[in-house]
Amino acid sequence: MNIFEQANSVISSKIIEHFFPGGQWRGEEYWITNPLRSDDKEAHNFSINGQTGLYKDLATGDSGNLIILLAHSQGLSRLESAKAILRHAGVDPDALLNKRHQPQAQATLVTKTKEEIYYPIPTEKRYLYQKQLKSALAWKKSIGEPSQGVYTYYTDKRELLFSIVRFAVTKKNGTISKKFSPLFLKHTGKLLWSNPIESDRPLYHLPEITEAPHLPILLVEGEKCADISVAGYIVCTWSNGAQAIHKSDWTPLLHREVIFWPDHDHAGRSTITILQAILPHLQVVAIPHDKPKGWDLADAVAEDPSLDVHAFIQEHLQRNQAFQQRTQEPLACNFVALGYTPSEWVFYLKRTMRLYYLKNTSITSQHLLQLEDLQWWKSEGFISDRGTFYLTQVIDYLKPLFEKPTAIFDYQENMGAGFYCINNRYYWHTGTEIYDMIGKKHALSSFLPKQIFIAENPASHPFYRYSQRVPSSLARDIIKRYFFARNWAFNQDNFSAKIALGWALWSPFCGLWKWRPHLHITASAGTGKSTFVDKCIAPLTAPYALRYNNLTTAPAIRQAVNKKARGVILEEFEANGKEGDKHNTNIENIYDLAKSASDDASRKTLKGSPSVDSHGNQIPREFDIQATFLFISIREAVQNAALSQRIINIEMQPSAVHLDQYMALEREAEVFLQEESADIIAHNFRNLDYLKRESDAFTQALITHKINARQAQNYAPLLTFSHFFIYNRASSIVDLASHYADIIRQFQAHSSAESQMDDAEKCLDKILQADILGENNERKSVMKLIQLKLDTENRDEIASIDTHLGRGGLALMHLDTTTLALAIHTNSDAIRYMLKNSSYASSYASILRRHENCIESHYRTQKTKVAGLKPTFILLDLQSIIVQQPEE
């Protein structure tokens, strides 16, 4: 509670009698002559309530509280009046004022049911809350009470607290009224349809209030009005109407410029008196008398969508002399002119650390209040006495800022959170601040105008903060053991685990390397690859990695990654047959994007719709992609030779350790990864000079030991980071170059041996997942057709399926009573069409003959045709194929 609420809470009959002696008690009312009027001679028109301190003058209709009455009757300010009441009650008011900058106490909760509520709602429970809220709204709609708005309240740190829903209720006479219901989430997972918070309720739009301390507050009645954006103001309200004003926490507004726009009715006028008792500096918008009853901000905007709300406020503002204006010292300007485009002026806003694009052909006061607050424009003489802008003078002031020959805005210098090298020094943009390697903090505007660092929203991008802490040796050991405990197909000296660990550690810094390798992890279904990504990879890369699935398109990734050095994690990255050729083409497009992203020489691509310069010339849109990709799939997708030089393929197998032991290790590692991942990234950042030197030296050492130069560039950074994580600086990986060169050769030999069979598996998989067009333009995958034939005994259906398969160059053949084979024609255009987006199309027959389930590589039937095909086939054991294939 603030000092005014504290003063109201200590009011008693003794305090009332002390300040206003000589009255008479009639029940709870204390009757006296009106201390504000000299003409009142009798004590029967003016009373003070002994419980609340509220006074009423029956003769004039005036009312208010004890603080106002004492202030007006004795010539005090309201603050002095509140202090006097507190001192008489034995409370030190100065001690209360000194507490206002201390952390706020938790709101008082009076739970009206036995179940407790989440306050705030944890991040992992937000989905449950939204699901329950959606169900509640659907139920209300079904009983004739549709929602007209959902208003969500947050803490100043944007933690979700509760929502208030506005429902439309139809009365018996047919009229529609509004009803408000607060909705909290109980620990049981159900909703609480009442407000259990009895004090210190948060204001609506509290995060915006705290994040923009320079902007004035426009206080309105109701969330509907508070959701209207007014340039130059933070619009806010309180919950549950005038009867609950005293239950809200008004501390954030005590030292802010606050303007109240009341509803145009008796309740709105009464609210002014109550609010002024809490906020003595409150200024009020005087609503014109010709406006209809209940007229508010929403009505004003609805009447005239082009209304200049700021100008209306300034014209009708009742100024409060108690409000202390800001310091008269010259105010620092918030905006920096960066450059221009053909239609816009581009500014950097220092307070929000973001770019603002101002259309230079239609400038209004709303736009200017986005650049700077009203006080600055006033101090510079751009505001008239009526509160309106001198727009001509403003434009004349801004124009010269953009008349320099070099003032064309360069989008390439726009940089978000991440790690950067500027003048051979490394910097960490955490999202709101910049740190160098020795821990010195820099403002984002420090590098203007050449480097433009843009602030990221911490709510949607919770980037790690800079930390001086060193990861504990225990944490490093547990995390290392967790990576090593995985069962990898190639596990010589834990090589695959070190590669995976190294990618997770290195990927946040990938933009600092001129060559960026990619990683492909394959694992069969049920191996736990998704859990591995969630619990091992993600904490070490987050929040500097973007995650997608196989439905994501290359343009979407290009748009998200542009100009940001990021790791990109693509899960389920394989063709599933459901989208046919379109899906295969998308995979190839993403591979092309990965190919260009790996090399500084080819990272810039011209894509998308071109822009037009001031002379009407089309300028191709340039994307600058500095990314490293992690592909996760059941099988390795098809790659061309150029891309294979950029990707390291490792295979994960089901865990070989005892399940209980592994799960215990996983839980332990998960705790350390959650607690120390930020420290690990910060520790790597402080050692970037060392890691970069080690990586470059290790690359050259591997080349010296006869490792291909491109492969050396692939393995060196990943192994360098994992080695540093395990040993810190106690051991140099360069000294182990000979050892790792032998391991890399063994790994490549292993991969080459596996690839022969892998190609046959992948080729067959593409055929089985491909769609065949039937007689009625019906598409079915080959695998689906096989399953349908095996499941039916209807001769007509079997004949139809045989015809359908025959169009694809395929047939099912019974070789004997126990063996059923899939016959694949050795020279079929239909099969080559199925494989057209892969490297298998021209040589599929020779590849499939190496398949482990091949029964006959040159089968010739005695018949002239089988299912309409010529009689030369490759026969594969169908039973083995069905066992290996997952169900659709």
Image (cartoon, rainbow, N blue to C red):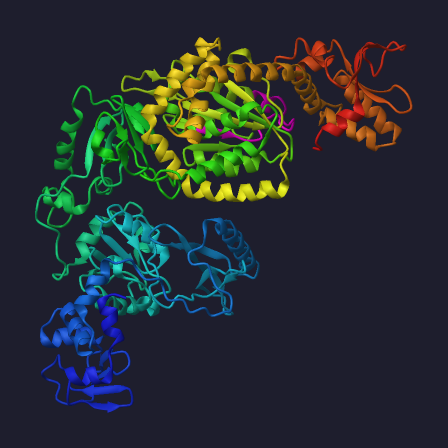
**Nearest the eye: 333 or 39:** 333
812 lies left or right of 686: right
Residue 581 inside the magenta-drawn segment: yes
**Range of magenta residues:** 567-585
Q: Quadrant of residue 881?
A: top right
Residue 607: percent from left, percent from top:
42, 19
Q: Quadrant of residue 883?
A: top right
Residue 79 inside the magenta-drawn segment: no
At a point 49% along the width and 49% down the height, the residue shown is: 124
305 lies left or right of 326: right
537 lies left or right of 215: right
Residue 359 position (above or below residue 230) = above
Residue 735: percent from left, percent from top:
42, 18
Count all numbered tags in the image, as a single digit: 0
Residue 269: percent from left, percent from top:
26, 67
Residue 193 position (above or below residue 873) = below
**Nearest the eye: 661 or 144:** 661
Q: Quadrant of residue 762?
A: top right
Residue 855: percent from left, percent from top:
81, 16
Q: Is residue 720 visible?
A: yes
